[in-house]
Image (tube, grey):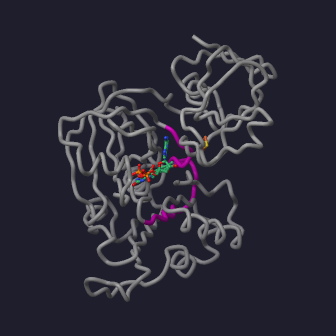
Amino acid sequence: MPHITIPATNTTFDCNDDTIMRAAARNGLGFPYECNVGSCGNCKFELLEGEVEHLRKDPPGWSERDLQRKRYLGCQAKPLTDCKIKLNLRDHYKSHYLPKKTVGTLAAIEDITHDIREFRFKLATPNPFLPGQYGLIAAHGVEGARAYSMSNVTTTGEEWHFQIRKVPNGACTGALFDHLKVGDTVGLDGPYGMAWLREDAPRDVVLLGGGSGLSPMVSLARAATASEKLAGRKIHFFYGGRTPRDIFDAKLLSVLPGYGTRLLFHPAISMPEAAETPWTGKVGFVHDFAKEMLGEGLRDCEIYFAGPPMMAQAITKMIVELKVPTSQVHFDQFF
Ligand SMILES: Cc1cc2nc3c(=O)[nH]c(=O)nc-3n(C[C@H](O)[C@H](O)[C@H](O)COP(=O)(O)OP(=O)(O)OC[C@H]3O[C@@H](n4cnc5c(N)ncnc54)[C@H](O)[C@@H]3O)c2cc1C
Ligand code: FES
């Protein structure tokens, strides 16, 4: 089994049929990462000695220049020999619950919108997670695992639920939506991610989601409404779609305690001209809606967001303009 050494910190860990970043996380080390699928480049390290190969050939977060400088992606690099590597470990990335690989058996499926479905898996080896975190799903016949955020809240980790948006011609979503049946299995690995609920933060909570970013926001809303530490705090749930059929039924949230008083749901659509059914609600983008409603008050909130890259960019810009402290903003970029 290959051993990985980080000479600068005198750290050594085993990496058995795994990528270097995931093995480090399983050993409780704070190896920097974000997407886990080779897209963001946040997990780069320098290879000082040894040989590695990337799981994903030609990952978007890696370039020819990186190869020349012997820099590789920790989330994709599997060691072929013992390796010495250079990178800065950071406590921020240490996992609360150590990620583990297991098998999930599909127990139930529920439609959430016309193209978002909740898949509920029972785990062969239970593993808890923090609300807002994500796992990797390896579906049969699909090359590479994909990241999906859990929508449920659990202390035992016996079930992981995912709200997944079907991507036209998508390999993994195609396998899940078109082929997976109750009783079938997938590979699961996790939990991962930094956008977990900060219960100790004494602020109102703002959740901003769009499209595929629904799942972690639902998990955060479920946990925040149940949290004694956050009792008395408002929870604003902004969710955006293009047309009314993209907006989920409010009963997903209205069953939670404090709905309408403490938990406030603010849906919006951005393409009213294409609406299939009449829409009397808000029109626009979620970041504009949040800015209009809360304005500079956003500086006093704990903000979580998830969704397509364009939405994430617009929210990031708004947060910078409003000078919201970065320590109060939590997200794992979707790719
Ligand atoms: C942190 C995170 C959390 C996410 N959470 C959710 C969620 O809760 N709900 C949701 O609907 N979507 C979520 N996504 C998006 C999801 O991971 C997929 O990108 C999306 O479902 C499309 O996958 P696909 O296989 O159907 O589409 P495809 O078009 O076949 O695949 C595209 C995606 O797969 C990646 N990819 C392609 N080849 C490989 C490979 N060999 N190995 C690894 N990755 C590869 C691409 O970078 C791209 O992200 C999340 C993404 C990230 C990064
Ligand atoms: S590329 Fe490795 S975490 Fe994003």
- Outermost residue toward the left? 182
Q: Position of residue 145 (x, y in %)?
A: 44, 38
> Depth check: 235 or 99 in front?
99
Q: Position of residue 76 (x, y in %)?
A: 58, 34
Based on the displayed image, in which of its 4 quarters is residue 202 positioned?
bottom right
Based on the displayed image, in which of its 4 quarters is residue 263 positioned?
bottom left
The number of numbered badges drawn on the structure is 0
| On screen, residue 251 above or below 42 | below
Q: Residue at x 60, y 42 (%)?
A: 58
Residue 315 horizontal side relative to residue 170, left or right: right
In magenta segment, residue 197: yes
Q: Position of residue 246 (x, y in %)?
A: 33, 71
Q: Residue at x 45, y 26 (%)?
A: 100
> Depth check: 224 or 305 in front?
305
Q: Give the residues drawn in magenta, as a range.
A: 192-210
Residue 309 horizontal side relative to residue 150, left or right: right
Q: Residue at x 61, y 18 (%)?
A: 80
Q: Position of residue 211 (x, y in %)?
A: 41, 64
| On screen, residue 305 above or below 244 | above
Residue 117 horizontal side relative to residue 97, left or right: left
Q: Residue at x 46, y 48 (%)?
A: 132
The quarter of the rendered structure image containing the N terminus is: top right
In magenta segment, residue 95: no
Based on the displayed image, in which of its 4 quarters is residue 154 positioned?
top left
